[in-house]
Amino acid sequence: MSVALSNPTNTVVAAPLTEDQIRHRLEGCPKLASLQSINKALGELVNSEQSLNSQIAEIIRRDPSLASRVLRLVNSVYFGLSVTINNIEEAVFFLGLRQLRELAMATPVIEELNNLESVASSPLPWKDLWSHSISTGILTREILATTLDSRDDDTDYLVGLLHNVGKIVMAYAFPQELTTVVGQSLETPADVCRLEREVIGWDHAQIGAYYLERHRLAEEITFAVRYHNEPEKAPRHRRFAAAVQVADYLVRHAGIPGGFENIQPIADEAWVQLSGWKILYGAEDTDTRLARASLANVLQRLPQVLGSLF
């Protein structure tokens, strides 16, 4: 039986699934080796102080997709080199270890999730989703770097990169329900979550967190994904979730949409009103103004970084 649920267009949709039905569908969704390893070999090498550019370059050469992305990035307008770089080892020198880690983590996840994308029952803007996810990863890292929560590992980047993984899982496990959500015009990311809960029973944040828990990812990552739209409710790791929420809004404001849903443009300074901004920065002061300037600079370089990935 169908019931009318509250959504912007008064569309009639099926009643949400039960908890058992949701879990049953998610448990049938394939696991991804890339999420379990996060490119282990390269990750260990670039995190070692003894690593040589030649060793890193050799590992990159084994992955044609990663190698092509490395070369596209180093030859982008962002780096402004006067000559074209065609040598992986030279590219490693120019890019630096942090950007190599970002590319190394994003590449296998994107490639493997293409297998889930292929089952979608209708065309979806996958490139928009991945552009947004990668941009959010970069911004999340920069946001946390402006606070006392900067990390030496890559948790800060991963929580942003993976925050919308639930949407890809929805395309595999809940294709009809996702079609209903995609067809709506909504005002904010919070409205998207509300509609998802009405249609499915869980929103993409809860679906993504459950999926990542099955991959045994760290609690910091699963909690940040679960609460990235409502960080004030996170029982732990609240500042990671807060950084993702703010990054999500900044990226949308910069004109990089969130993927599938149709959301109105984010107004200037809307992120300052978010619970995540208040968790991270509190009241306006000198440090907050410096953080704003730093994030504005990062947003300016995002188009060049994205151009290297797609």
Image (tube, grey):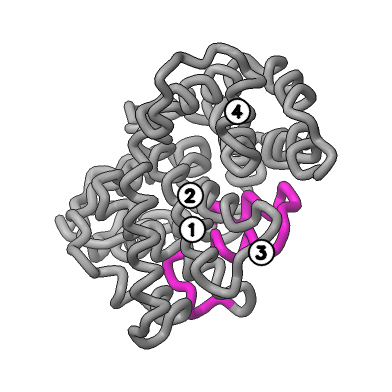
Which label sits in the foreground, 2 or 4? 2
Q: SS class of the residue under badge 4? A: helix
Seen at 32% across and 40% down, the residue is 179
Marks 2/3: CA–CA distance = 17 Å
Q: Residues within 10 Å of mark 1 (few under 14, many from 20)?
A: many
Which label sits in the foreground, 4 or 3? 3
Q: Which mark is residue 242?
A: none
Marks 2/4: CA–CA distance = 21 Å
Outermost residue toward the left in this view: 9
Magenta stretch bounds: 207-234
Q: Which mark is residue 142?
A: 1
Disc 1 and disc 2 in contact, CB within 8 angstroms: yes
Q: Is residue 215 left or right of residue 241?
A: right
Q: Which residue is mark 3?
A: 220
Q: Mostly what secondary structure, the magenta segment?
A: helix
Outermost residue toward the right in this view: 50
Q: SS class of the residue under badge 1? A: helix
Residue 221 appears in the picture as rendered:
yes
Disc 4 and disc 3 in contact, CB within 8 angstroms: no
